[in-house]
Image (tube, rainbow, N blue to C red):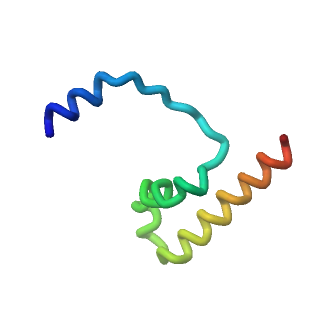
Amino acid sequence: MLRRRDEVQRFRWSLRELPVVSPFSFAIYASKIKETMMLEDPGAAIERIYAEMYARVRDVTKGS
């Protein structure tokens, strides 16, 4: 296991700033911020984040 981690660290990574979260990555995005979601009802948090995400998508698509 340790060997694989060392190999991954040598990979060339390129991080990209994206204007919105892909719908396919939404579950990953939501789990990444689970600490803040614990402070509110999980269902309400997911609904709020989903609405924010699609508001961003609308803003980006209007601009293009």
Is 8 placed left or right of 3 in the picture? right
Quarter holding the N terminus is top left
**Tally of marks:** 0
Q: 16 or 42, which lies in front?
A: 16
Relative vertical location of residue 10 with respect to residue 23 in this rendering, above or below: above
Q: 37 or 32, which lies in front?
A: 32
Is 30 placed left or right of 48 in the picture? left
Q: Picture coordinates of residue 14 (x, y %)?
A: 48, 26
Q: Picture coordinates of residue 55 (x, y %)?
A: 73, 58
Quarter holding the C terminus is top right
Relative vertical location of residue 44 with respect to residue 61 in this rendering, above or below: below
Q: Residue at x 59, y 63 (%)?
A: 49
Q: Residue at x 44, y 70 (%)?
A: 39
Q: Picture coordinates of residue 13 (x, y %)?
A: 42, 26
Q: Picture coordinates of residue 48 (x, y %)?
A: 61, 68
Is 23 placed left or right of 38 in the picture? right
Is 13 placed left or right of 21 in the picture? left
Q: Residue at x 46, y 66 (%)?
A: 37
Q: Residue at x 24, y 27 (%)?
A: 7
Q: 54 or 25, which lies in front?
A: 25
